[in-house]
Image (spheres, grey):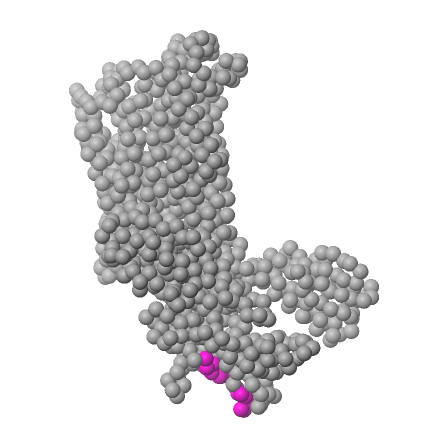
Amino acid sequence: MLELVPPGTQIDFIGHRRIAYAISGTLLLAGVVAVMVQGMRLGIDFAGGTEVAVRFAHEEGVDEAAIRAIAESCGVQDPTIVRYGETSAPEFLVRFNRVSDANERECPSAAGEAPAAPAPTPAPPAGGDAAAPAAGAPGAPAPVPAERLASSSATAVVDRLTPALRTKLGDLDVLSVDYVGPQVGDDLRRDGLKSLGIATLAILAYIAYRFSSRFGPGAVVALVHDVLITAGIFAIFQLEFDLSVLAALLGLMGYSLNDTVIVYDRIRENMATHTKLNLVDVLNRSVNETLSRTLLTSLNTLATVLCLLFLGGEVIFGFALAMVIGIVVGTYSSIFVAAPILLFLEQRYGGGTKDAKSSGKPKPGPSGGKKLRAKAQAA
Amino acid sequence: MNQLRWRITWALLTVFFFAFLTLANFAPESVRVASPLLPDKGLRLGLDLQGGIHWVLGVKLEEAEKQELGFLAESLRQRAKDNEEFHVESAALEGGKLVVRAASDADRSGVRSWARKAGLSLASEDGGALTFELSNTARAAVRKRGMAQVLEVLRRRITDPVQGIQDSVVTGQGEGRVLVQIPGGQIDRTLARKLLAVTGHLEFKIVKDAAPNEELLKAKYPEGWPAGTEVVTERDKETDRVLTAYLLPEQANITGDYLQDARVTFDRQQRSEVAFQFNSEGGRIFGDLTQEHIGERLAIVLDKRVYSAPNIKSRIGSSGVIEGRFTAQEAADLAVVLRSGSLPIPVQIEEERTVGPALGADSISRGLQAAVLGLVVIVVFVVIYYKYSGVYAAAALIANLFLLMGVMSLFRATLTLPGIAGIVLTIGMAVDANVIIFERIREELRSGKTPRASIATGFNKAFYTIMDANITTLITAVVLYQFGTGPIKGFAVTLTIGVITSVFAALVFTRLMYQVHPGTRPVASLSI
């Protein structure tokens, strides 16, 4: 029989809980500091803006500087240009927030290049997307059609940019165009926070229904711990936070509870069967007994998500990364945090003394530990 | 035993049925339709996988409210003029509200009672000036009507049989938003946008005066423009230079609302033009108008731009032609817009997600690779780690995948890239249920129970743990479905179905396999 964790393993997780508190505390604090100091690096889903991904057929003469020059001549202001993909077929991401008037000579309007319109009259009947910024002749009545297009001129710029890149730098495929207007960005941000809140409440309700008041708070703390640390890591390393990362976080909320549930179910079972053991021993025993399945289930999911991370491509990378981080954090928390938090809450709930309250902080000191242990036994 | 045989038959049939539905998706469309056996339709691919355009359009419903107030102001003026009930000095829009000035108390109370019936509520009163705004019910009605009109027009344009784009979908999305989905990557984005962008408000107006540009026109009216007129220009399409400035009445003599049809025709020089036809009522109005104004010029105004202003030589009945130095494409676009009617309220693109066909194909192959490798890794792992029982888990896992894909095919669900990610995740999570069961069985074996008893206890004790774990995932998946749009929704869909099928597969299929072997036979050891 292959065994990841030999039966009878007895690691004193509860005894070493201070280390876990220190690690978790540091990560949480670092995340909060990172959010306050540098903020989340929001993707265009939440921040708004335009993103164009292109893939060139060949490499010659194609670099960030050349693309930047062309983009700016087309009216793109302060573009961020990122290169990714294989060297033989370089892929570039052009991201921008603001547009201005284009230099018509260097960057002619798009429809002129469209094969469907052979005649040199590129503008659409109503005056043209391309002419949008130049709208509003003096004295013209207020709602001219060009003005109606002005706010979508970011997408109009894209229609000029890609043909210009094609003529100047060689054949290319437009992989994707994303534009998120300010209103939609705000809405997505609000809806995103709302959905996180609703999911938390719904899970809380389920936990309250399923677990006693003894286990519920612990499960919630473990859950919030996992989501906050995962989000914090995105802030610390300035990884891009977009809709798919949010989706991953929501998925993680459900998943991170899985392992906690396994441990808690066992604790409940052991409390009933081993009434003579004190709480610390029950907790240690339960974590040890479930250690192999906690690790195995996590490793399985981690393995598939890693496949996604390495093979899934650029589009799904953020999602897979959030999943990988979340699963690692979630596994750590079910082993090192979920059970000790029960002890912490139990003591606080029961005694509420200063010692018990301070046990959440990494305060080394043998006497404190002994007192807590004594209290736990009393509980 | 007999009962067991039934169960096995039933389980095998279920798996085969869903496997069939799953695999049918790989057959090309033509084969599926031709074959009597295969279902014609299966899984849909999201726009992020097949390529296409996804737009969220914002509808400026405030504009509809303003139009409604303008319309009410006009009808109030008309009413005060026509019957002598009450007098108003002025009725005009000021800062998005309707301000009515009336001299006497009697007039003001007349206005107030008129306003109540018209769905206006009094916002403030200051001496002789009454300020009205739309009442809440009237506002809601105006907004609702505006949305319905916009949806109707956009649908007609995008699905126009001649110029439209097949398989596109136009749906309302909450208050003031329209979702437009245009599949296929080959579409010209600019063309698609043009169909949406042109409001297509066609008006015919008798020209009062004209000059080569606005300054020259202005010079003729040193005291300002005559009341009830506006200046509209004709511009060169290439350079946007003003060709002629026209002084036109503010109110159109006749609008495109009376149009019945519009199509592309060619003049003698084979230049494209757009021929239009009025309905009977429009034809009558147009006939009277042209009769009255023979020798004058008629300006054809589209979206506040003059296209041409021909001389009226004789009475024109129900049909006419718009000349505008169009390219064939432009003429065709314009014909669609005229056919579909004018867009009463301006719309703008608030969100765009366009995926090219290259990226879509890329995503499919990468997603498949990740899924296949994930599956292989998991299968190899469980078989090595749990040996014979691992084979059960692997079989249950594959059955689960068929169930998941089969259910999605049955309901014609949309598969997106995050959806594929959800399937990959499901592979990892589905096996978790088996791991929980197997670890429990191992534990029971270690405690000295017989294999049969261990299996029974393992399944029973793991049941609640598995349920808890999956219900929480289900909760988040449902929240995600409510919140998510497009691709993200696809993730929620696969996750939801995947959670349900994986619990089913682990608890029913794996258990059934244990009932087949070892079943009721007394065995000394279990391969786990």
**Between B379 and A101, which is closer to the camera in this rendering?**
A101
Residue A288, by quadrant, is: top left
Give residue B302's position: percent from left, percent from top.
Answer: 51, 74
**Between B126 and B263, which is closer to the camera in this rendering?**
B126
Is A258 on the left-hand or right-hand side of B37? right
Q: Which range of residues does the magenta coloring cover?
A: B311-324
Give residue B91's position: percent from left, percent from top.
Answer: 71, 67
Visible residue check, residue B38: no
Residue A299 vertical placement versus B156 (above, below):
above
Residue B179 vertical placement versus A297 (above, below):
below
Q: Is residue B205 magenta?
A: no
Image quadrant in which the N terminus of chain B is located: top left
Visible residue check, residue A59: yes
Q: Residue at x 45, y 8 (%)?
A: A367
Residue B465, by quadrant, is: top left
Q: Residue at x 28, y 23 (%)?
A: A292
Give residue A101's position: percent from left, percent from top.
Answer: 46, 62
Residue A161 vertical placement versus B504 (above, below):
below
Is A208 on the left-hand or right-hand side of A58? right
